Image (cartoon, grey):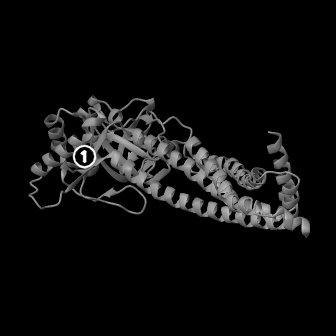
Amino acid sequence: MERIILNLKIALGALGNHRLRTVLAVLGVFFGTLSLVIVGNLSDSLSLKTEQEVDSLGKNLVIVFSGQLRRHGPRFPLATRATNLTLDDATAILYAFPHAKEVSPSGMKAFPVRYQNTVLKAVAVNGVAPNFAEVRNFEIASGSPITEDDEKNQRKVAVLGPTTAEKLFGDENPVGKTILIRRVPVQVIGVTVAKGSDISGADQDNQIFVPLKTFLRNFTNKEYVNSIYVQAAGDSVIPSLQKEIVALLRIRHKIRDGMKDDFTVVDLKDVNTLKSDAMGMITILGRTAAAASFLIGALGILSIMILIVNERRMEIGIRRAVGSRKKDIILQFLLESSFISVTGGLIGILIGMMASLVIARVLSYPATISVPGLITAFGASALSGVIAGIYPSFKAIQVNPVDIIRS
């Protein structure tokens, strides 16, 4: 232990004589460690965020959209304006499959909304079934939800999202007040609990819910719906239920073999997979950048160690002449190279954790610290120093003490 402490003191003294070169070598390892830590933490944060978003949409959901979905940029695909899903389709799904625990059809269209002198030009108005709140995991913050009686009697009532309620009423309690949706007077009976954005990035709090039959009769005067939410009895039955729904709707819509579906069935886990794949690409790019930084850092350590060996040939020769063993010389130079890399690694881990927490806060992601990521980053930094110090260490023990003494 005394030999290690002595060699470490010598190493620190030698590195202190080359401060600028040492700092540059530390920076290479620092950036590599920083990249690994940030990528690992943000990858875990995004994964957790995606799981939370999927859970907020509802548990074990399979969603049937009218028309074919198309992706627009990074957002979740949006349905075309098809007119092929009906309430009868929803009823058929419910009674045809035992694994379909709940079925909740829904229509949606944007309308201007007014309360006194406040006018919102376009708010998403959703016609929903009474079980919509349960299926979609919506909770009521104040007032009451839409009931079977509201649906049966086609009452002109509405539940507001908290963002819509704030825009229309400010600090005033909206429950019991009357608003105009398009030109139809509707009484507010409740306000939902805030849920934030969904997977598509749409604000789930900036919308209005009305009974589905009221929506179809008073707002669209149509018989079709935009989507059907199907809650499966369990996670394991979702793949088979998805296939069964596709087969049933193809028969009901008279779609022959070889023809494209006029609907889209989506499992929310598929969306989770898409996001995970996207994050996987980001992770690969981040790790590639980290590997490049570690390589640059290792080359920097290698160059400074070779330079130190050449400048300290006299010291090495004298130490060898007075009895230092080869393994002491190797240990000394390995300690010097490892000190550079470990220092860069520790600084990179510390700043990487702080940067990850700041980025997660800015992006409204759950803050997480990836322990495996920290271990990997520290291990990579330490390993790069050891590998970079091997060649200079063996070059140092090749110094001939006799030649040094003669000179």
Looking at the image, residue 171 lies above or below residue 405 = above
Task: Left or right? Give the position of 396 relative to 259.
Answer: right
The C terminus - image quarter: bottom right
Residue 3 location in percent, x, y?
A: 82, 44
Whether residue 393 is visible to the viewer of this picture, yes or no, is yes
| Residue at image location 53% in from the left, 45% down from the top | 45
Residue 182 spot, x, y in % from top left: 36, 51
> Of residues 403 and 22, which is closer to you in this image?
403
Quickly name the residue at label 1: 216
State the image quarter where residue 99 is shown: top left
Given the image, on which type of amino acid does mark 1 rest? Leu
- Does residue 55 appear left or right of residue 150 in this picture? right
Q: Nearer the viewer, residue 224 or 354?
A: 354
Does 95 appear above or below 18?
A: above
* Callout 1 secondary element: helix
For the point 65% across and 47% down, which residue is it?
Answer: 353
Placement of the N terminus among the 4 image quadrants: top right
Residue at 54 percent across and 61 percent down: it is: 288
Q: Is 407 or 220 nearer to us in this picture?
A: 407
Give left or right: position of 360 versus 224: right
311 and 340: which one is in front? Answer: 311
